[in-house]
Image (cartoon, coloured by chain):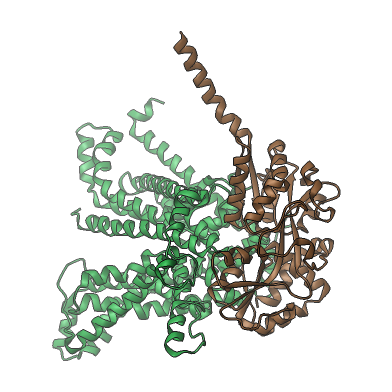
Chain colours: A green, B brown
């Protein structure tokens, strides 16, 4: 087809058709199969699977657990994240840049690694209990992270950064003259806060809160590691167990239910935010009025740093300690320390070696494919403005509402029978990752392309450049930094992914997440911790890169 | 000319070389703890150069679920299965999933530890025992009924994750009744996923006592951890974890070689190094464990467990995890 390179019209449609086909294979096919399978019973359509799933003893408890857990974690995250955001953006507390980065740290630590750390710190034989019994002489165990309360606390610690970063953003973009007017009109500090500041940041809190709610209800690692000993089951862990049994029909029914909850949450977000559209948060960078903490400053500074020590430094220390002592609970004397577990996972143990390579391969491939697919679709929508491309974009965004564990179930249904069997291979995990992270790639590529002015490409076209050449010489180079940012934003979560790979891994296709989880679950706490240290090293470096790249993108004039 | 021939030979060798190795690849699906399984596989590969074992290690039920899923998908990837849930092999035989193979090496394995038709051979003798933390427990239990006295300072593995626990729970339910577990639940006994985790919880002092397997506890003890084994007066749940070949294997020769190795003198001596009791009568067991002849074993109703395995798992969950 020579014409496709000379006629821009054809090329565009061929590319778009290919992108649409890819979306159908990656998103539409597995999702619709999941919905269909959940309704199929003995060859006919019925609600039997749902009935069966709901009639299982204890399933209502599970649903109830999931809902209250997510609600409580959301409220707690707001309660932690909002004051911290205020502290950073509205007060004269010192060392703000450090505090800001360190407050975001729990976001960098993968939840399942966090769970391991909190077991070591606040488990029944954890360091906190040891310290207390050493100090008080009593054998009573005070802390037990293997409890519903423990699940709530660990989840909240990993979730509050969502709220924090959202509220910081809102406070920094807010027009400070409004607050000042209120003050001049005679309103006190608290009245101003209640009538002006809070209503203005509320949309950001709601947006972040819904994200926390969804992230909590779909989280698998924390309830899986901490919940079982407390007999605390939630939807995600129940689906996982149903697949182990295996009871696929009930698993698909519960997956559909979980998906319905996240979709409802997203609608609620849209509804709540739609009614409160405030335009007073403008893009202008005006220095807001800073509250002087005065005599409170030393106390608040100490609290802030203690908080950071507790939620960011201690967990890292705990994981490193577990990885470098002979056995968990060994006396903390020099003879107990050993580098052998690091040596073991890096040079001796094929499973962990493979897991590291697999996760790198999966993260690089998923990021590349998702960003490539995202760029094509975004280009068609934003630049070429082809009719129908909006639909492709919307369909590509669907997985945003699909929890990871549901993506995995859909993939099992789609690729374990039929002409193409991918189950048991690394390709099914890759396919799942592309589906999972496509919405994120679409969002960043959409934003990047919006920043490039149409006139540049038009100028190239009027000067005689073909569509492909204009794309290659104008659009591609200009969008490169944004694309890279989008790539990193897929790479990072894909590298440390657990939920999907825990269900889809097989011999030879272990990921670092799945391997860490399996090793921890099998009682190899030291080896699991050593692997977790590697994951942490990559994520800490990577996330810092993300902030840097993001900062650059945001500060590039469009 | 000579160079060309040499080069051609080299290229030919290079092309043929990997193929010969590929021929020796088998997939081993097992519930043997990761570190032990990896070590065994390494020793096998070293004894038979050119062979390669791809290891898939997870709990017994998950191994079975995986094989089930692969069967549904139309292609069973596993060549050899070696899990602790000995009852599962009955169902696999009935479904035609296993291949008969009577290894000549199995002559030294007592008759009770191998299938009379040759579908499976016991290759790893494991005992469900009670382990306790020596720093925390002053008077160790000496009966299975003492276990509940430790309440939430005691833990058992979950039959969903551990085949040995499935066999144990089935035997207890069959012989002593489910009330045994109802009492455990009333006392607040915890459930962890597998035997290694149960041992790890005892070692770390998260619990005082735990049901776990003898060799895992012994391995921890040899690392210097404060753990000791109890051989309860009623006896222990002794399982000769069977190794078997899948009938769908594309590589029966290597699979058979692996079974030979597993029950061979070298294989069993290697098991002993990993603290396991040998299945062979001509291999001495590890220091720290009694001789297998002297172990009082509770009779296990394998057939009954095979027919009721799903019920055992769900009944256990219903009692212990709610």
**Residue at x 20% of width, y 57% of height:** A555
In the rendered picture of this protein, how many numbered marks are placed on residues? 0
Residue A274 seen anywhere in this rendered image of the structure:
no
Q: Position of residue B120 (x, y in %)?
A: 78, 49
**Residue at x 63% of width, y 36% of height:** B24
**Residue at x 70% of width, y 40% of height:** B257
Which quarter of the figure has residue A75? bottom left
Nearer to the camera, B108 or B35 = B108
Q: Position of residue A333 (x, y in %)?
A: 41, 71
Asked if residue A185 is positioned above or below residue A498 in the image, the reply reads: below
Question: In the displayed structure, does residue B62 sit left or right of residue B116?
Answer: left
Q: Position of residue A112 (x, y in %)?
A: 47, 65
Question: In the displayed structure, does residue A374 sit left or right of residue B117?
Answer: left
Asked if residue B229 is positioned above or below residue A506 in the image, the reply reads: below
Which quarter of the figure has residue A74? bottom left
Nearer to the camera, B110 or A374 = B110
Quadrant containing the C terminus of chain B is: bottom right
Nearer to the camera, A19 or A529 = A529
Residue B247 seen anywhere in this rendered image of the structure:
yes
Question: In the displayed structure, does residue A168 sit left or right of residue B234?
Answer: left
């Amino acid at each position: 087809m020579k014409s496709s390179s000379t006629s821009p019209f054809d090329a565009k449609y061929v590319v778009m058709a290919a992108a649409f086909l890819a979306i159908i294979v990656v998103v539409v096919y597995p999702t619709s199969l999941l919905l269909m399978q959940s309704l199929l019973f003995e060859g006919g359509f019925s609600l039997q699977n749902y009935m069966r799933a709901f009639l299982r003893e204890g399933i209502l408890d599970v649903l109830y657990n999931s809902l209250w857990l997510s609600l409580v974690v959301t409220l707690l995250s707001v309660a932690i994240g909002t004051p911290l955001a205020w502290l950073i953006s509205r007060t004269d507390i010192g060392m703000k840049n450090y505090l800001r980065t360190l407050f975001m740290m729990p976001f960098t630590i993968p939840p399942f690694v966090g769970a391991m750390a909190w077991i070591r710190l606040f488990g029944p034989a954890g360091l906190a209990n040891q310290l207390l019994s050493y100090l008080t002489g009593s054998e009573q165990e005070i802390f037990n992270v293997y409890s519903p309360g423990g699940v709530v606390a660990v989840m909240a610690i990993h979730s509050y950064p969502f709220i924090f970063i959202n509220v910081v953003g809102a406070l920094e973009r807010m027009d400070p003259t409004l607050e000042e007017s209120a003050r001049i009109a005679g309103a006190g500090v608290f009245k101003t806060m209640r009538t002006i500041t809070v209503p203005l940041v509320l949309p950001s809190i709601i947006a972040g809160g819904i994200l926390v709610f969804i992230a909590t209800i779909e989280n698998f690692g924390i309830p899986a590691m901490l919940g079982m000993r407390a007999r605390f089951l939630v939807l995600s862990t129940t689906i996982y167990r149903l697949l182990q049994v295996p009871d696929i029909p009930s698993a698909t029914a519960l997956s559909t239910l979980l998906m319905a909850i996240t979709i409802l949450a997203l609608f609620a977000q849209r509804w709540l935010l739609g009614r409160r559209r405030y335009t007073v948060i403008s893009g202008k960078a005006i220095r807001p009025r800073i509250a002087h903490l005065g005599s409170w400053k030393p106390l608040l500074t100490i609290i802030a740093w203690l908080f950071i020590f507790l939620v960011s430094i201690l967990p890292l220390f705990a994981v490193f300690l577990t990885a470098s002592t002979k056995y968990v609970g060994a006396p903390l004397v020099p003879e107990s320390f050993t580098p052998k577990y690091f040596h073991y996972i890096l040079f001796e143990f094929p499973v962990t070696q493979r897991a590291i390579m697999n996760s790198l391969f999966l993260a690089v491939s998923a990021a590349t494919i998702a960003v490539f697919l995202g760029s094509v679709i975004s280009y068609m929508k934003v630049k070429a403005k082809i009719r129908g491309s909006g639909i492709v974009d919307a369909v590509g965004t669907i997985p945003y509402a699909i929890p990871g564990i549901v993506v995995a179930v859909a993939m099992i249904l789609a690729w374990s029978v039929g002409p193409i069997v991918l189950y048991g291979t690394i390709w099914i995990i890759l396919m799942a990752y592309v589906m999972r992270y496509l919405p994120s790639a679409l969002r960043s590529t959409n934003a990047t392309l919006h920043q490039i002015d149409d006139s540049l490409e038009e100028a190239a076209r009027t000067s005689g450049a073909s569509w492909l050449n204009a794309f290659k010489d104008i659009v591609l180079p200009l969008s490169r930094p944004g694309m890279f940012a989008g790539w990193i934003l897929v790479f990072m979560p894909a590298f440390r992914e657990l939920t999907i790979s825990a269900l889809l891994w097989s011999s030879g296709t272990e990921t670092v997440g799945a391997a860490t989880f399996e090793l921890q679950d099998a009682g190899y706490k030291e080896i699991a911790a050593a692997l977790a240290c590697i994951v942490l090293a990559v994520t800490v470096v990577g996330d810092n890169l993300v902030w840097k790249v993001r900062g650059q993108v945001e500060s590039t004039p469009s | 000319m000579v160079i060309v021939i040499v080069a051609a030979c080299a290229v030919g060798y290079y092309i043929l070389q990997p193929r010969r190795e590929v021929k020796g690849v088998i997939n081993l699906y097992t519930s043997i703890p990761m570190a032990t399984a990896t070590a065994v596989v390494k020793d096998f590969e070293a004894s038979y150069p050119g062979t390669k074992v791809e290891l898939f290690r997870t709990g017994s039920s998950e191994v079975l679920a995986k094989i089930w899923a692969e069967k549904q998908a139309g292609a069973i990837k596993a060549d050899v299965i070696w899990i602790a849930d000995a009852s599962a092999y009955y169902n696999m035989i009935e479904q035609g999933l296993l291949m008969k193979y009577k290894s000549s090496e199995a002559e030294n394995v007592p008759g009770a530890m191998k299938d009379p038709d040759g579908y499976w051979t016991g290759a790893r003798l494991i005992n469900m025992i009670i382990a306790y933390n020596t720093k925390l427990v002053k008077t160790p239990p000496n009966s299975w009924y003492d276990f509940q006295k430790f309440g939430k300072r005691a833990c058992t593995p979950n039959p969903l994750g551990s085949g040995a626990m499935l066999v144990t729970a089935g035997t207890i339910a069959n012989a002593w009744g489910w009330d045994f577990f109802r009492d455990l639940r009333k006392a607040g006994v915890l459930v962890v996923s597998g035997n290694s985790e149960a041992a790890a919880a005892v070692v770390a002092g998260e619990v005082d006592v735990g049901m776990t397997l003898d060799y895992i506890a012994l391995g921890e003890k040899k690392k210097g951890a404060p753990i000791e084994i109890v051989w309860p007066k009623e006896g222990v749940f002794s399982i000769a974890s069977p190794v078997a070949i899948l009938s769908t294997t594309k590589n029966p020769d290597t699979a058979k070689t692996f079974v030979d190795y597993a029950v061979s003198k070298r294989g069993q001596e290697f098991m002993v190094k990993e603290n396991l009791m040998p299945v062979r009568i001509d291999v001495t067991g590890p220091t720290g464990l009694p001789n297998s002849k002297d172990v009082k074993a509770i009779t296990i109703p394998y057939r009954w467990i095979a027919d009721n395995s799903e019920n055992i798992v769900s009944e256990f969950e219903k009692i212990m995890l709610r």
